[in-house]
Image (cartoon, grey):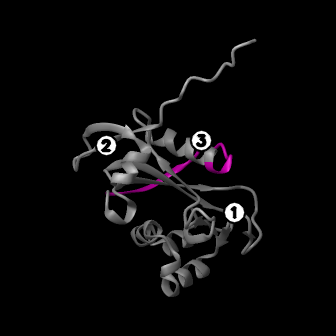
Amino acid sequence: MAALQTAPPSSPPLVEILDVERRVVAVLPVAEAARQKLRHRAVVVLLFDEQGRLSLRRRPESPSGKLGRWDVPVRGPVLAREAVHDAATRSLLSELGIHAERLRPVLELPAQPENNNEFLQVYSLTRPEAVTPGAQDRESGDYSFSAEELGCLLRDFRELVSPRFLLLAEAMNLKGLWRRRP
C-alpha cells in the first residue's frame, strides 16, 4: 500500500510589529497582529475607472456572509521583509486578479485605532477598462461611486462606511482628488 504524501505544513504569513518610530520590535503572524491590534504596515489600493469613479466593496460583516460596510476592495498587510510597493502589487493580484506595476503612491496614514493600528500606505490605480456608470456586482458587493454618490454616502450614510475608509476619505479629501482625475 502506497503511503499518502501530504504537503508540509506551511507557516502563517508574518508581519513586522513596529514601535511609534516604525522600528521593528517583533515579527508575528498576520492574524495575531490583527487580533491584538499591534502596529504594523499595510497597503490599500484605490481603484478608479477612466471616468473617475471609485470602486468600493461591501465587506462581509459576519460569518453568514451578510454584507456590511463599504470599504476599499484591495487592502492587505505588508509581510515581513516585503517592500511596500510589492505588498500593494501582491494584494491587488490576490484580491482582484489584476497585475499592475504602475500603482501611484497617494499618501501614508499613521497607525490609529480607526485603521486597526496599521501604518497605511495608500496607492491608486486607474483601470483602463470601462465600468458601466453606477454598475454594481451583486455577488461581490462591488460598486463604482461617482464623486456625487460618494459625497452623499460620506455625508448622509456614514454608518454604512468602514471606519478605515472614513479616515481615508477625510485624509485625502477624495472629492477634490476626483476633480483632478487620478
Residue 36 coordinates in the image, percent (x, y) = 33, 52
- 3 or 2: mark nearer the eye: 2
**Circle 3: residue type:** Glu
Q: CA distance from mark 3 to mark 2?
A: 26 Å
Give the residue drawn at x 55%, y 62%: 72
Q: Quadrant of the N terminus?
A: top right
Residue 167 vs 41, above or below: the answer is below
Give the residue at mark 2: 17
Q: Which segment did they paint magenta?
A: 95-110
Say if 5 sits above or below 168 in the image: above
Asked if disc 3 and disc 2 are in contact, CB closer than 8 Å, the reply is no
Residue 140, labelled with which disc? Answer: 1
Q: Provide the secondary structure element on which disc 3 rests.
A: loop
Q: Which of pointers 1 and 3 indicates the residue nearer the eye?
A: 1
Asked if residue 171 is among those painted magenta in the image, a careful observer would answer no
Q: Is residue 96 left or right of residue 59?
A: right
Residue shown at 47% from the left, 68% from the top: 165
Q: Amino acid at mark 2?
A: Ile
Which residue type carries mark 1? Ser
Q: Secondary structure at mark 1?
A: loop
The first of marks 3 and 2 along the sequence is: 2
Residue 101, numbered label: 3
Q: Residues within 10 Å of mark 1 (few under 14, many from 20)?
A: few
Q: Secondary structure at mark 2?
A: strand
Residues marked 1 and 2 touching at CB (< 8 Å):
no
In the displayed structure, does residue 21 sit left or right of residue 139?
left
Classed neighbour count for the residue bearing mark 2: other residues with Cα under 10 Å, few (<14), some (14–19), many (≥20): many
Q: Residue 7, how many percent across, how many down?
A: 61, 24
Residue in the foreground of this view, choosing between 33 and 78: 33
Q: Quadrant of residue 136?
A: bottom right
Residue found 60% across the figure and 59% down from its top: 47
Q: Is residue 176 left or right of residue 35?
A: right
